[in-house]
Structures are given as structure tokens and as C-alpha cells.
């Protein structure tokens, strides 16, 4: 039933394209393109889930996070071209807290109602948590430097952002080596339990086609953001943190909840926490380096409100996963934290 609903939502792709060509209201264009991205993100998630059956849960979780984050990355590239730097930073913040609180919270909550207690590899969870804490350090230090040394010029800030970005990408590469090679046994407990419904070739074709379609719809969506901000009086911060992030995380939502309902919590954590880690340790720094090609470079100076939200999200996610097991109440606590932050971002000027 759910697959039929998502398949039916594919009609929004040509409808959104037609709305753009006919110059419909930006509100309608934004809504239609957002609805078009949701089923595409779902099929990206399903394709990577099918691939994980053939490649193993460690690589499968990485592929799910990577192609799931392709939506955010593509949206951010178009936003860079449009000079919407604050929207990009807000969407990065939203993606991190969304994956750690909303996606992980929904997965734990849904799985907790079906199973009284769900267990996962404690060592792997703590390793992921440590990488997230490193990401927090990398995002906080440039902002603190900027606050405590306001007289420093933009060139120094840009150089600091480039240095931190390169270091983050290198450490992220090392973490992938840890997950996929040197300690992959920590992430392979659930490999081979089920046979896939798709072939490897079909999964790859679906991934490529869906990702290209997401790029197309993302360009349309980004073009409608500024008129919506003016029409509703919403801030770019709220648009980026909530709307753009939730749309981009649609793949992770579907996959993580599905895995939790199948009692595959190791893979559910790999998808949600792995996605947040990839956003913080790879996507954000990669965008800083790519922005050097555009007229308006991006730095790693996030505002204090965004940083506090990220820090608190990492802390509560680490606290809940450090014991190697979860229940529905912990999922509800993560969802409550997300709701509090969402309302705060809505009212924040």
C-alpha cells in the first residue's frame, strides 16, 4: 500500500515542471517540487536498502546515507549558485538535528512499539558518537574564533574554514575505513538474513535515475524559496532547518523506520547517525570548498542558535545510544526534543 502511494506521488514530477514553466505562484511551485522530491527520496532509500542485501549492512548503510544525502547536497549546490548561504547553513543544521532527533527518534519509537527492547552494537554506536562530537568541535571552533576575535578579517576566517574543512573530510575518510574495512565486523551482524527483491543492476539504475530527477526538482524548489520567504515572512533559517531538511531526509526517514520495524537497529542507526555524520563531516566542508568556485564563498561560521541546537542534538543522541539498546520512550524523548527546537526555530527572528 505504502509503495503504491509513493509511486502515485511521482505524478508531482511533471506537475511541478509544468508549474515552473507556466510561472505558477512560487508557493505552489515550492509545494509541488517538494512533493515530487519525497517519493524520489523514498526510491533512493529503497534502492540502497536492496543494495545492502548484496553488499552487507556496513556498505549498505553508507550507500543509504550517501544517496539519501544526495538530495541535500544537490539542493545546496543550487542554493550556492543562487547565493543563499544562510539557507545552506540552516539546511545543514536541520539535516544534522533532523537525522539525530526526528529520523532516529521515529525509528526507535516505531521499533519500540513492536519490540519491548531493541539491541545494537554498543562499540559501533560509541564510535559513531565520538565522530559526531569531533564534528561539533569542528563546527563550534570557527564560530567561537569569530566571536572572540571580531577584528580578524574575512580572509583569515576563510582560511580557517578551508583548513577545518579539509581536515574534516580526511577524518571522515578515516571513519569510512574503520566502518568498511578495519572494523567492519562491528556492522555486519545482520548481513544475509533476507534476500533482496531487486537485482544489483535494477538497484543501481533506480539510484541513478532518482538522483538525476532529484537534481531537476531541487533546482525548481530552490528557485521558489526567496519569494516564499517574502510572502509568509518566514526566515531563511526556518525554511532551511525545517522544510529543506525534512524534504532532504525523506529517504532516511523511510529506510530507518523500515529497518527498525524489522528489528535491524544496527542498520537503522547506521542510516540515521551515519547520515548526520556525513552531513557534518563531509557535505558541509565539501560545500565550503566548492563555494570557492562561486562569487560568494561559504565559511563554517554558524550562528550560536544553530550551534547550540547541533550540540544538544549530539549529546542526547549519544546518551540514548551509549548503552547499546533502545525502547519507545527514548524515541519519544528524541521526537520531543525535535519539536521543541522546531518551534524555537519558527519564532527565531
Image: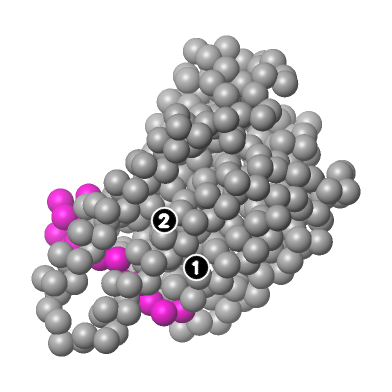
Query: Residue 222 at x, y = what percent?
Result: 38, 54
Q: Which residue is rendered at x = 50% and y = 70% of the image?
A: 311
Q: Is residue 174 visible?
A: yes
Q: Which residue is rendered at x = 52% and y = 49% of the image?
A: 127
Query: Residue 165 at x, y = what percent?
Result: 27, 56
Mark 2 is surrounded, within 10 Å at the Cα level, by few (under 14), some (14 to 19) or many (20 or more) other residues, namely many
Q: Is residue 324 left or right of residue 127?
A: right
Which of the 4 quarters of the picture holds residue 92?
A: bottom left
Asked if residue 142 lies in the magenta stretch, the reply is no
State the SS at label 1.
Answer: helix
Residue hosting label 2: 280
Q: Is residue 230 left or right of residue 82?
A: right
Q: Which residue is rendered at x = 29% and y = 72% of the image?
A: 142
Asked if residue 303 lies in the magenta stretch, the reply is yes
For the record, the magenta segment spans 290-305
Q: Is residue 146 left or right of residue 340?
A: left
Q: Is residue 23 visible?
A: no
Q: Which mark is residue 100?
A: none
Query: Residue 265 at x, y = what percent?
Result: 70, 41
The secondary structure that dominates the magenta segment is loop
**Marks 2 and 1 in Cβ contact (< 8 Å):** yes
First in residue order: circle 2 vs circle 1: 2
- Compare residues 316 and 114 and report the one nearer the observer: 316
State the SS at label 2.
Answer: helix
Query: Residue 202 at x, y = what percent?
Result: 53, 15
Q: Which mark is residue 310?
A: 1
User: Which quarter shows the N terminus?
Assistant: top right
Q: Which residue is rendered at x = 47% and y = 20% of the image?
A: 204
- Compare residues 253 and 329 and report the one nearer the observer: 329
Q: CA distance from mark 2 to mark 1?
A: 10 Å
The answer to whether residue 204 is above or below residue 15 is above
Amino acid at each position: 500500500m505504502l509503495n503504491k502511494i509513493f509511486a502515485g506521488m511521482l505524478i508531482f514530477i511533471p506537475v511541478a515542471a509544468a508549474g515552473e514553466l507556466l510561472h505558477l505562484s512560487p508557493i505552489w511551485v515550492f509545494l509541488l517540487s517538494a512533493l515530487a522530491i519525497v517519493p524520489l527520496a523514498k526510491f533512493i532509500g529503497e534502492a540502497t536498502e536492496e543494495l545492502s542485501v548484496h553488499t552487507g549492512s556496513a556498505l549498505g548503510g553508507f550507500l543509504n546515507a550517501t544517496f539519501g544525502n544526495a538530495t541535500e547536497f544537490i539542493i545546496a549546490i543550487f542554493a550556492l549558485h543562487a547565493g543563499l548561504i544562510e539557507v545552506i547553513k540552516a539546511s545543514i543544521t536541520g539535516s544534522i538535528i533532523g537525522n539525530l532527533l526526528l529520523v532516529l527518534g521515529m525509528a526507535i519509537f516505531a521499533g519500540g512499539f513492536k519490540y519491548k527492547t531493541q539491541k545494537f552494537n554498543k562499540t559501533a554506536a560509541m564510535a559513531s558518537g565520538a565522530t559526531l562530537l569531533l564534528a561539533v568541535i569542528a563546527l563550534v571552533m570557527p564560530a567561537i574564533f569569530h566571536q572572540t576575535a571580531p577584528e580578524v578579517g574575512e580572509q583569515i576566517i576563510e582560511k580557517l574554514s578551508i583548513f577545518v574543512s579539509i581536515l574534516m573530510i580526511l577524518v571522515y575518510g578515516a571513519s569510512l575505513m574503520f566502518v568498511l574495512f578495519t572494523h567492519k565486523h562491528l556492522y555486519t551482524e545482520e548481513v544475509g538474513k533476507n534476500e533482496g527483491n531487486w537485482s544489483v543492476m535494477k538497484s543501481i539504475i533506480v539510484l541513478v535515475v532518482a538522483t538525476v530527477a532529484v537534481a531537476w526538482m531541487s533546482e525548481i524548489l530552490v528557485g521558489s524559496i526567496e519569494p516564499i520567504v517574502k510572502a509568509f515572512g518566514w526566515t531563511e533559517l526556518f525554511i532551511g532547518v525545517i522544510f529543506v531538511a525534512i524534504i532532504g531526509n525523506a529517504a532516511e526517514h523511510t529506510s530507518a523506520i523500515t529497518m527498525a520495524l524489522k528489528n535491524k537497529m544496527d542498520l537503522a542507526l547506521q542510516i540515521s547517525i551515519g547520515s548526520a555524520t556525513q552531513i557534518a563531516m563531509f557535505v558541509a566542508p565539501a560545500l565550503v570548498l566548492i563555494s570557492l568556485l562561486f562569487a560568494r564563498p561559504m565559511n563554517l561560521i554558524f550562528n550560536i542558535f544553530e550551534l547550540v541546537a547541533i550540540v544538544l542534538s549530539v549529546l542526547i543522541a549519544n546518551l540514548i545510544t551509549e548503552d547499546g539498546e533502545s525502547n519507545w520512550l527514548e524515541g519519544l524523548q528524541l521526537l520531543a526534543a525535535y519539536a521543541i527546537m522546531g518551534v524555537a526555530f519558527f519564532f527565531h527572528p
